[in-house]
Image: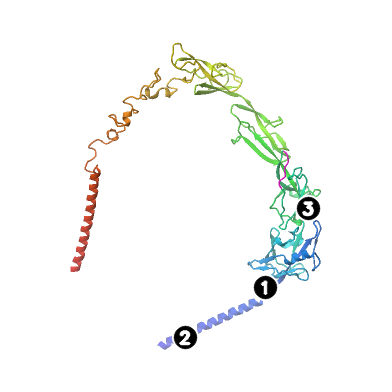
Amino acid sequence: MNNKIINKVISLIVAFITAIGLFAGVVNAQADSKTTTEVKKYPLSLDMDIVLKSGDGYIHPGAKNQVAKNIENMWENLPITVEDENGNKIDVKKELQSNFQRFVGNFAIGQKLTITIDTNSILDGYNLSYNADHEYISQASGYSKFTVKYHLDKDNDPMVVRISFGKMNVKFDPKGGNIGSESGTIIKTVKKDNTVDFPANPTKKDLEFGGWYTELPDIEAYRQRNIVGKRYYWDNNSLFSDCNRDWQTYNDTTLDPLYDGVFLLRAQWNARYTFNANGGTFSDGTAKKSEAVQQGKNINILPAPTREDYQFLNWADAAGNTYNPGDTYTLNANTVFTAEWKQIRNTVTFKNGDKTQTVKVETGKAIDTDALTGQSMPKNPTKDGYTFKEWNTSSDGKGKAFTGTTTVDSDLTVYAIFTKNTGSDDGGDNDDNNDSGSVEPDSSDNPELNVGGGSVNNNRTLDGAANGSADGAANGAAANGSSNGLANRSGSAKSRTAGTRSSGVLPNSGADASGVTLASFVSIVFGLFVASCAVINLNSAKHLR
């Protein structure tokens, strides 16, 4: 029986080994098949074009010694890397073939390759450029890094990527402004990294610099796209090359000819408008509106602001010219528009000592006769020992008297004037002293004159609860625990009466409290001891059993 089992096991092992062998044979056969159908690869080379003089055309050396030695050395030793889709990098050999090309490696059709050029090794005065042969570029990062897809040319010859080295200048026209101490144009050369060192911002009287621009001219191609006059703005981050700038119609060609190696940038001048509400406010609560726009543009005069007690008349510029809201204005220079107002209401301030009251009145009219409602002369004030005489434009009573029929043409302040009563010793000797008077002395209008139910007597002392009497809350006895004793909690309404709390609950003195604490502690320890003994006895009993 055991021999039969052993034989079956051996048979299974042999069958398993045989299956593995067959599987390995199939895998090897597939590998051989793949080897025979490997993707075909083709060589890739780099070639160069170069401009010898700005504005000239490009030349294409076909062998060594056809250009200056410094140009040949630059091309031969220029660091260039090529990276495929899988991140494999190739440092292109610094070696020129007989046709002046540099060999990169072999690649399959359709393979994407990223080419990076170290611009630091380019000759001074030169920059990278593109030309018609670069139509195979599918993605670019500036000029020094771009992606190509490998393909054969129209004659089925291997791919050659051409790298161009150009020369180009940028001309800056300040359009009547000054660049530092210079008033004319400035020319800068495009650098190795295709950037330009921009000059300092120009300045011009009564205008603000708005940037360097190009403006698309009025030609058919731009008319069809409705972009005539569109401006592009350029700065230190902009990149320049001849084929992408000087060979393109960014400006009117009568101002900026094509293919001359010079790219024109002009200064834009902006004019700033400012609307000053001049004491008023706009609908958003601001008092001033300001913005710079392109010089020569039309703006609309802003809506009128508002101002309490004033009527808006118009906007006026520094020359005195006036404008109405909604008018169109051509902004050729920085301009400030100021709101002009007509005061239609004035304020009369009535002063009686340190007390004041204000009343509105229509400009050119009197308080009693204008059309304003709720605005009337105040009641005549009073003063102990004095009789109110009048309101006067001077605090010493030597100005003009003011009444409800006085015409008001501007804001003003008037003062209460009193005459001392005969036989009165109160109030001092100055008849015009009005410090202690009041405009409305009755208690209903001025609660401070009737404090705590007391009254003011002729000796200017306050009777009643405010007086320092023996039964008042302000009595010093209440603060020191006297028989009235408002500060004594044991005798107050908030303190508990005798007998409401059991004297046996908690001891009051420190000694009694300490005794209770000690007794509690001893009780706890004793309880723990008894419990421990009980456990020991229980264990002993179990052991005896």
Residue at the (33%, 24%) spot, across then down = 469
Quadrant of the frame with the C terminus:
bottom left
Q: Point out the frontmost of discs 2 and 3.
A: 3
The residue identified by callout 2 is 10
First-in-chain label (3 vs 1):
1
Whole-angstrom CA distance, mark 3 to mark 1, is 48 Å
Q: Is residue 417 above or below residue 311?
A: above
- Image position, residue 30 (x, y; %): 61, 78
Determine whether the residue tagged by mark 3 lies in a helix, strand or loop.
Answer: strand
Whole-angstrom CA distance, mark 2 to mark 3, is 90 Å
Whole-angstrom CA distance, mark 2 to mark 1, is 46 Å
Q: Amino acid at mark 1?
A: Val
First-in-chain label (2 vs 1):
2
Report the magenta residues as a range: 200-205
The residue identified by callout 1 is 39
Q: Residues within 10 Å of mark 3 (few under 14, many from 20)?
A: many
Determine whether the residue tagged by mark 1 lies in a helix, strand or loop.
Answer: loop
- Image position, residue 381 (x, y; %): 48, 18
Q: Is residue 358 left or right of residue 231?
A: left
Dominant secondary structure of the residues highlighted in magenta in the image: loop
